[in-house]
Image (cartoon, rainbow, N blue to C red):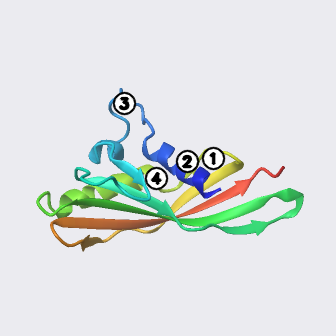
Amino acid sequence: MSVELLKSVYARLTSNDGGAPPDYNDFYDAVGGRIYALEAPPETSFPFCVYNTDQPDVEHFFGNRQRLTSMLTIDVIGTTEAGASALMDVETKLYAHLDLQELACTGFDRLRIRAIQRGSIEFDGGEQYRISSIFEMIATSTGA
């Protein structure tokens, strides 16, 4: 089920907000479309985004329904050359695009995302900055 959650997050992060392609949304444009689940490929250009979920907590209800609660961590990584404020601008676009959104997810009748912790900037060694933001995802199954 975690794979379906990751796919839904990717669909939202790459969704079009009405702009003509190649414009998708402000966050997508800010990272140049470099959005990856779990890890980025070697030699990826900056800035880029990597996201992952933890193992969901599952609650079982009558009628074979379930509620999954999972934490989604999204890291935005950029260079010190571009500056911390440039990376904070990207995080602001991420927050605006993802917080309090309802997503479609296979096997679930609803999936809602809300910010738990806005990222703070960290020096990630070398010449990189990282901002990690944490979102809570709650999904309810359709039962079957």
Task: Tell me the tag on residue 19.
Answer: 3
Q: Are marks 2 and 1 in contact (CB under 8 Å)?
A: yes
Query: Neighbour class for label 3 at 10 Å: few (<14), some, many (≥20)?
Result: few
Which residue position holds label 2?
Answer: 8
Mark with earlier residue (4, 1): 4
Q: In this orientation, which residue lies closer to the viewer: 20 or 107?
A: 107
Residue type highlighted by circle 1: Cys
Residue found 16% across the figure and 69% down from its top: 126
Residue type highlighted by circle 3: Gly
User: In the rendered image, which quarter contains the N terminus?
Assistant: bottom right
For the residues labelled 3 and 2, the Cα–Cα distance comes to 20 Å
Task: Tell me the tag on residue 53.
Answer: none
Q: Secondary structure at mark 2?
A: helix
Which residue position holds label 1?
Answer: 105
Q: Nearer the viewer, mark 3 or mark 2?
A: 2
Which residue position holds label 4?
Answer: 98
For the residues labelled 4 and 1, the Cα–Cα distance comes to 15 Å
Q: Secondary structure at mark 1?
A: loop
